[in-house]
Structure formats: structure tokens, C-alpha cells
Amino acid sequence: MTLDCAIIGGGPAGLTAGLYTTRGGLENVTMFEKGMPGGQITQSSEIENYPGVTGEITGMDLMMPWPQQCQKFGLKHDMAEVNRITKDGNLFHVLKSDGTSIQAHSVIVCTGSSPRRAGFKGEEEFFGKGVSTCATCDGFFYKGKEVAVIGGGDTALEEALYLAKICTKVYLVHRRDSFRAAPNTVKRVKENEKIELVLNSVPDEVYGDASGVNGLKVKDKDGNIKDIQVPGVFVFVGNDVNNQTLIQEDGTYLCDVNEQGQVIVTLSMKTSVPGLFAAGDIRIEAPKQVVSAAGDGAVAALSAISYVDELLN
Ligand code: FAD
Ligand code: NAP
């Protein structure tokens, strides 16, 4: 069987694409998701900027009903990792990590982005043993203890606020003296007595022993080293796009991407390859918001419906 549309990734963009393609009349649509549907926002302790949602809710709470809503209109979910997407004539081939392959008339790539590493000594060695990129997942291990957070964007500051509720103290280490996070979030951080700002400083080394992290050394502008003795270090220094499924056997990309590997799309979420669409964090100039990823997913779905209609009729 050939799918009308294959959706790769089941975050806000993929799930919305699934809702709009199926509800818009495409018959055979499958969403391929390697983990639990919901995407990266399920790691967030709080979301307060999704329209219409008031009150304190977690990212997991927000995403919980989305898959069920899609299934009602016929979206199929394949819990599988996609290794590669190729195109042969008018047909796409979706190659899964189990070695099998599915054919599709159209594909919407919604594989999102993943946390970046900061690149300091010990970061890799102690990853999962005191170094983390998810406060909601690992914050509880440091209940009643002190932790360090690296970064000056929305994620770092929001997660520092979350950790300050669980931990006795949060050192917020940032390489500049001003933040790129939203002004309201910066204000809340500055007013929080449990958060100590360590500015104009970069992580130099995380150190520890067989039982985990014992501390973080940071270096300021003048080269002075400060030793912060904490068992937990949370790194929030931005994201890289997950574009691996677009890389072909010869190392080239299936469609045009920019120098950061972000997929170049039109306002209709069309890529340079007919029938291939991209939505959410993976595309150029993505605002990296749940609401815009969902919006992209809807736009990509409408474009995919038109494309398949024209191709088959
Ligand atoms: P993602 O959410 O990244 O979803 C991509 C999905 O694709 C994932 O589920 C992944 O498992 C899957 N996938 C990837 N590769 C493959 C593959 N090869 N095969 C199969 N499946 C694959 N935004 C806000 O609007 N408000 C906030 O308050 C907010 N807070 C945030 C807090 C944190 C801690 C983080 C990390 C992000 C936050 N964001 C927030 C940003 C928001 O989560 C993202 O912009 C949004 O999730 C992007 O959606 P997406 O569908 O494009 O990608
Ligand atoms: P980001 O905005 O790219 O911020 C990354 C931070 O890490 C920056 O402060 C950067 O410093 C710092 N940094 C980068 N590399 C570093 C390194 N090697 N060592 C030390 N510090 C380093 O990333 P983000 O905070 O994850 O946010 C990603 C996107 O999601 C943004 O568009 C953001 O607005 C969005 N988001 C939104 C919300 C929300 O709306 N509530 C919540 C979370 C995320 P500089 O500032 O000096 O560059």
C-alpha cells in the first residue's frame, strides 16, 4: 500500500499535520514517531504561552489529548524511527530503522530539534550522571540540594525557576550580563531569592567521581575560576535541528537546507522537492514555539492535500 502522506515526527507540528491531513480528506496517513508523541514540550515544567490555556500546566498536560484527537479522524501511528527519506520518480520511500520501507505520495518532515551540548570538559563523561538537559525529568533527584544551570535563553531561565522550587539554590551561569529570554521571565529570575546569577562566565569543567558530579568550575572574562560545588548541572544552550532523515546515501540533502541545516521552505511549507513539506522547529526562521509549530503543521497539511489531489486526479 502507498500512503497518501507520511508524517515524520509526532511533536506539535507532526500531530497537527496529522489532524489536518486526515480531517481534510487524505485516506492513508501514518505518523512515524520514535518515542512517545508530544515532542520536546513534554519536557517542559510549565507552558504559559499557548493561546487559550490559562493556569499552570506542564508541557505533558498540554500534549496529552493531541494524539487521541488525531486518531478520531483516522491518523495511524507507527512507533518507529525513520532513518532516511528518498524520492524515486513521484514516489517517496520512508526507510525505517528496522530495515523496512514504506512508500508515500507525499511526506511532511516534522522531526524538530534537540538540545545542544555546551562543549565543556566533563560534559559528555558525566551526561546522565549529574549533567542533564531536562529539569522536569531529573530535577527531583536534586530536591533539597544546590544545582547549576547554564544558558541565558528562555529555556535556561524558565527551568532555573522550576528548579528553584525543588532545590535550595540555583546558580545561573551565563556568558554575558544580559539575557535573551523574555523580559517577564528575566524579571522573575532576578526577583527569585534562590537564584544566584553568575554572569560573564562560561563553564570550564564539570568534575566528579564514580558516583556522579561533585562540582562545576566556571571561568569569568578575566580568566578567574570559580568553583561551584553542586551535584547537578543543567545545560540549556539552544537546539540543533534533527535533519538526519533528509541525508541521502551520498551525503547530500534530499532538499535545500541553509548553513545550519534548517530546511528551506516557502510560506506554504513547501521544500525544494515537490511533495516534500517541512514544519515546526526544523524549518528556517522557526520561532521555536508550540503554537507556531502547530500552525506550520496545519499549513503543511493543506499543501500536502492539494499536492496529492493534483497528483492522483
Ligand atoms: P519537536 O517537539 O522537537 O518534535 C519532534 C518529534 O519528532 C519528537 O517527538 C521526536 O521524537 C520525533 N523524531 C525526531 N526524529 C525522528 C525520526 N528520525 N523518526 C521518528 N521520529 C522522530 N515553546 C513554547 O511555545 N512555549 C514554551 O513555554 C516552551 N517551553 C519549552 C521548554 C523546553 C524545556 C523546551 C525543550 C522547549 C520549549 N518550547 C516552548 C519549544 C517547543 O517545545 C518547540 O518549539 C516545539 O515542540 C517544536 O515542535 P516540533 O513538532 O517542530 O518538534
Ligand atoms: P537560545 O534562545 O538559543 O539560548 C541559548 C542560550 O545559551 C543563550 O543565552 C546563549 O548565550 C547560551 N549559549 C549558547 N551556546 C553556549 C555555550 N557553548 N556555552 C555557554 N552558553 C551558551 O535557546 P533556548 O533557550 O533553548 O530557546 C530556543 C528557542 O525556543 C528560542 O527561540 C526560545 O524563545 C524558544 N523557547 C520559548 C519559550 C517560551 O516561549 N516560553 C521557552 C523555551 C524556549 P548568548 O545569549 O550569549 O547567545
Image (cartoon, rainbow, N blue to C red):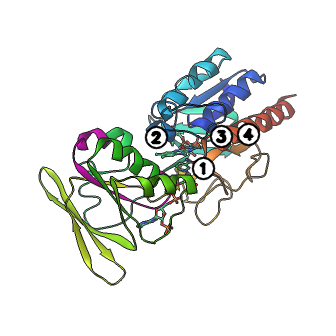
Q: Which residues are magenta?
A: 139-156
Mark 1 vs 3: CB contact within 8 A? no
The response on whether ligand 1 sits within 8 Å of label 4 is no
- Distance between the alpha carbons at the discs numbered 1 and 3: 9 Å
How far across and down, in percent of the image, does residue 11 sit? 56, 36
Ligand 1 has an atom within 8 Å of the beta carbon of the residue at disc 2: yes
Taking the image as shown, residue 167 lies to the left or right of residue 249, namely left
Residue, x 39% and y 63% (percent of image)?
118
Query: Do the CB atoms of the residues marked 4 and 3 lie less than 8 Å apart?
Result: no
Which residue is located at x 73 percent, y 39 percent? 300
Which dot marks residue 44?
Answer: 2
Q: What is the spatial separation of the Cα atoms under label 4 and label 1, in whole angstroms? A: 16 Å
Query: What is the distance, in whole Å, between disc 4 and disc 3 at their CAs?
Result: 14 Å
Q: Position of residue 1 (x, y in %)?
A: 65, 23
* Circle nearer the viewer, 4 or 2: 2
Q: Is mark 3 within 8 Å of ligand 1?
A: yes
Marked residue nearer the N-terminal end (1 or 2):
2
C-alpha separation, residue under disc 2 versus residue under disc 3: 15 Å
Front residue of this view, candidates 141 and 187:
187
**In front of the other: label 4 or label 1?**
1
Along the polypeptide, which appears first: circle 2 or circle 3?
2
